[in-house]
Amino acid sequence: MWQMRDIPFQRFDQLYEGPEFADARFAELVPWGRDQTFTGLAHGTPKGEHTPHGWGVLEHHEGFMQACAVWRDGVADGPGMWSSIVEGKEQCGYGAWVQGKRHGYFALVKEGGVYVEDYDMGELKRRIKWRKDKLHLQCARCRMLFVPCANSPEEKLCRFHLSKN
């Protein structure tokens, strides 16, 4: 994962040079959804002339913003971040979307606290109030926090990345 202050995509990444995004072109502040605009890679579909497809940022006029590394035919489908400045509901965070639904771990700041939420295809499974502790390490590959075992390798990796293969 990246830091919340960093943009969640590289505009000129090789991913966007492949055949899936070959017809996508840059669009700036084009309408997408009610009271929303999109800036990023887009292409024409039956959904609209400028359907988000590739990297981009969706903005709502009331202060909601979602940046995602991969949009597929108008649906967020990759790592991203969001923020809301709606008074009383201010929040920001980052995580990943799969077919438009939150999936996996999300880190967010809201309600005056820092949380880690675990989602399974849009369904919130658990919310953990975050506090700094010295028990966890950060995976050298995916940067997920984990508790290392006593017989761990020199390079600290979480259970999903035990080998380099």
Image (cartoon, rainbow, N blue to C red):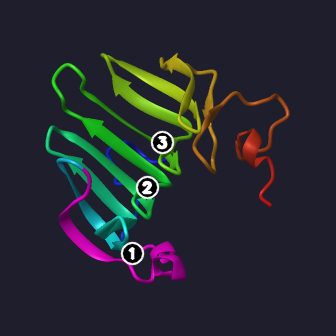
- Circle 2 residue: 75
Q: Which residues are magenta?
A: 12-33
Type of amino acid under label 2:
Val
- Circle 1 residue: 12
**Quadrant of the drawing holding the C terminus:** bottom right
Residue 89 in percent (x, y) is at 24, 23
Instruction: Point out which mark residue 95 bears.
Output: 3
Residue closest to the eye, 23 or 83:
23
In the picture provided, is 120 more to the left or to the right than 151? left
Q: Residue at x 17, y 47 (%)?
A: 35
Q: Residue at x 62, y 26 (%)?
A: 136
Residue 28: name its quadrant: bottom left
Query: Mark 2: few, some, or many residues within 10 Å (few <14, many ≥20)?
Result: some
157 up-or-down from 145: above or below: below
93 up-or-down from 22: above or below: above
Determine the residue located farthest toward the right in the rendered image. 151
**Foreground tag (2 vs 1):** 2
In the picture provided, is 156 more to the left or to the right than 7? right
39 up-or-down from 124: above or below: below
Residue 153 in percent (x, y) is at 80, 43
Cβ atoms under marks 3 and 2 closer than 8 Å: no
Query: Mark 3: few, some, or many residues within 10 Å (few <14, many ≥20)?
Result: many
Type of amino acid under label 3:
Gly
Q: Secondary structure at mark 3?
A: strand
In the picture provided, is 12 more to the left or to the right than 49? right
| Mark 2 or mark 1, earlier in chain | 1
Type of amino acid under label 1:
Phe
Residue closest to the eye, 14 or 121:
121
Q: Residue at x 82, y 28 (%)?
A: 150
120 up-or-down from 11: above or below: above
Whether 118 is among the magenta residues is no
**Foreground tag (3 vs 2):** 2
